[in-house]
Every structure is written in structure tokens, then in C-alpha cells.
Image: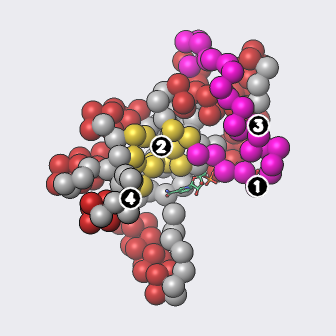
Amino acid sequence: MEEAYRAGKLRAIGVSSFYPERLVDVAALAEIPPAVNQVETHPFRQQDAAHAVMAELGVVHEAWAPFAEGQNNIFADPTLAGIDAKHGKRPGQVVLRALMQKDVVVIPKSTHRERMAENSDVFDFELDAEDMAAFAALDDGTLPRIFAHYDPKVVGWLVRDLVRTQQLGGGTLY
Ligand SMILES: NC(=O)c1ccc[n+]([C@@H]2O[C@H](COP(=O)([O-])OP(=O)(O)OC[C@H]3O[C@@H](n4cnc5c(N)ncnc54)[C@H](OP(=O)(O)O)[C@@H]3O)[C@@H](O)[C@H]2O)c1
């Protein structure tokens, strides 16, 4: 990636699911440190500690699965419903806005055009301190819900799958 960057083929280098110890390692050893780190981040796992390390290293924190892939019945969550009613917005919009106000870049995914429009319409309101405190309380401190990238079994599965994907000439895993 550094070679491609120096050759002008890349404008920036990004990594994904690099938790603090691994991010500090790569940022210290790489000649061109990562510009962005995409990490599982959503209301139930807001990654405040990892965010602090990224901020210190000057790495942009980007959320993957900002809606927790729909887990926890997120779009009907009563806390989010209370905040969205106050602002005349939808629960997903509150999630995206709250993460953005925490300096997290969000990349929600939807297969529905109207939801894509809804998810983009988050620049005309601001959550106040009370809203942000309620949002912060949704983080239950549990382990990652989707992939535990520090679990050797998960890493083994990901690496084997990635190698198999490349051998088949397919795309990338993420
Ligand atoms: N780097 C990594 O390891 C990694 C891992 C996972 C994901 N990602 C990336 O992160 C991005 C998003 O993650 P994701 O797709 O896994 O999860 P997500 O964005 O948290 O959730 C997507 C789910 O939310 C639904 N949804 C989206 N907008 C909605 C709305 N306004 N109202 C109601 N439902 C809504 C979608 O349904 P519909 O599609 O039916 O609308 C879909 O079921 C993707 O670009 C993905 O590639 C990266």
C-alpha cells in the first residue's frame, strides 16, 4: 500500500478493524500511517476508548455497521424514538447524527432508495447535550456484536476466507 501511495495510485491508506494495540503498532511502524480506520461502531458499541486512540494518532474513525446491521431492534429503540420525536426525525437519522457529532464518519448501507435519501438527510438538525447523554447510555459495553477481530478463531476464519476468495479470483471481503 505504501508503494502504491508513493506511486500516486492511492490518495490515502485506510485500514479496517484495527483495534488500539494493532493501530498503534502500524501507525508507529509504517512510513505512511493510515488515514482512516473503519471499526464496528453503533449505538450499542460506540468505541469511545478506541476513538480516543485514533484521535491521538490522527486517524479518522469511520463506523462500519452504524445501524448494528439492524440488531437490537434498533429502528424501534425507545430511547432513539424519544430523541427523534423531539427533532422530527427518524431513529436512523438520530443514530447517524449522534455518531457524526462524536466525530465518527458514518457509512450506512441500504438497498432502498427512500432510506438512502433519509440517511443522507442529517445535516439540518443538531442533538443537544441531553440527547447525546441518552445516546451515550445506549452503549452497553458488550463485546463486538458482529466480528471479534481479536478472537483467534474469528481471525483464522477471516484469513482463510480471504485467501480462498483471492484464490477464486473474487473481490474483497470488506
Ligand atoms: N470493514 C468491515 O469489516 C465491515 C463490516 C461490515 C460492514 N461494513 C460496511 O459498513 C457499511 C454498512 O454496514 P452494514 O450494511 O453491515 O450495516 P448497517 O448499515 O448497520 O445496517 C444495514 C441494515 O440497516 C437497514 N437500514 C438502512 N437504513 C435504514 C433506514 N433508514 N431505516 C430502516 N432500516 C434501514 C438496511 O436495510 P435495507 O438494505 O433493506 O434498507 C440493512 O438491513 C457497508 O458499506 C459495509 O460494507 C464493513
Determine crowd level at label 3: few under 14, some 14-19, many 20+ residues with C-alpha closer than 10 A. Answer: some
Residue at numbered disc 2: 62
* Discs 4, 2 touching: Cβ within 8 Å: no
Residue flagged by tag 4: what amino acid is it? Leu
State the separation of the CA atoms marked 3 and 4.
Answer: 31 Å
Which numbered disc, 1 or 3, marks the residue that appears first in the sequence?
1
Which numbered disc, 2 or 3, marks the residue that appears first in the sequence?
2
On residue 10, which mark appears?
A: 4
Residue flagged by tag 2: what amino acid is it? Glu
| Protein image colouring | secondary structure
Residue at point 38%, 63% (across, down): 9
Quadrant occupied by the N terminus: bottom left
Which numbered disc, 3 or 4, marks the residue that appears first in the sequence?
4
Asked whether, in this view, residue 18 is left or right of residue 117, the answer is left
Residue at numbered disc 3: 118
Taking depth in this image into account, of 10 and 167 the one nearest to the observer is 10
Q: Is mark 2 on a helix, strand or loop?
A: strand
Q: Is mark 1 on a helix, strand or loop?
A: loop
| CB at disc 3 and ligand 1 closer than 8 Å | yes
x then y, percent, for residue 122: 67, 29
x then y, percent, for residue 140: 52, 35
**Which range is magenta?**
107-132
| CB at disc 2 and ligand 1 closer than 8 Å | no
Mark nearest the camera among 4 and 1 is: 4
| CB at disc 4 and ligand 1 closer than 8 Å | no
